[in-house]
Image (cartoon, rainbow, N blue to C red):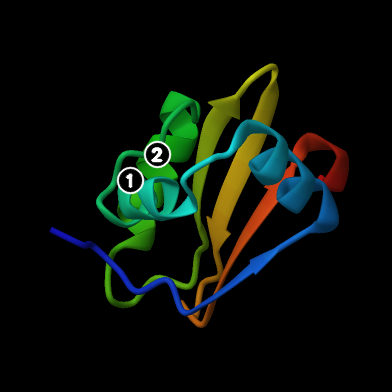
Amino acid sequence: MKLFKLGQITMTPSAISIIARFKVPIGDLLDRHEKGDYGEVSEQDWHENTLALLPESLERIMSVYRVGNTKLWVITDPDRKVTTLLTEEDI
């Protein structure tokens, strides 16, 4: 079950590079993110994601997935209009 809407999907150049190099199935990552499998986030971030699902929340939802030796972040903005894929060098 999908927990929230992703909105428009955007990617930074470094995320595009990692996705292309490792042939990452983007749809699978986005599906995990939407369903609440946030990957390698901290316990605090997991808790914040849970609170961000409340209708009155104005917080982002963040997932972190390891791709090779790189972490790929998936962040959905508070208004759920944009989800961005980015890497450590973008943070």
Provide the secondary structure element on which disc 2 rests: loop
Position in image of residue 67 (x %, y %): 60, 27
Q: Vertical placement of 39 versus 51: above or below?
A: above
The residue at the point 51 percent across, 72 percent down is 78
**Residue that mark 2 sits on:** 38
Q: Vertical placement of 69 versus 35: above or below?
A: above
Nearest to the observer: residue 56 or residue 38: 38
Residue at mark 1 to residue at mark 2: CA–CA distance: 7 Å
CB contact under 8 Å: marks 1 and 2: yes
Nearest to the observer: residue 26 or residue 63: 26
Instruction: Name the quadrant of the C terminus.
Output: top right
The residue at the point 65 percent across, 30 percent down is 71
Position in image of residue 84 (x %, y %): 63, 62
Q: Please give the label number shown on residue 74.
A: none
Nearest to the observer: residue 43 or residue 40: 40
Q: How many marks?
A: 2
Instruction: Name the quadrant of the N terminus.
Output: bottom left
Amino acid type assigned to the residue bearing label 1 in the image: Arg
The residue at the point 82 percent across, 47 percent down is 14
Position in image of residue 6 (x %, y %): 42, 71
Left or right: where does residue 6 sit relative to residue 1? right
Left or right: where does residue 40 sit relative to residue 71? left
Toward the left, the furthest residue is 1
Left or right: where does residue 62 sit relative to residue 73? left
**Residue that mark 1 sits on:** 32
Provide the secondary structure element on which disc 1 rests: helix
Are there few (<14), some (14-19), or many (20+) residues within 10 Å of tag 2? Answer: many
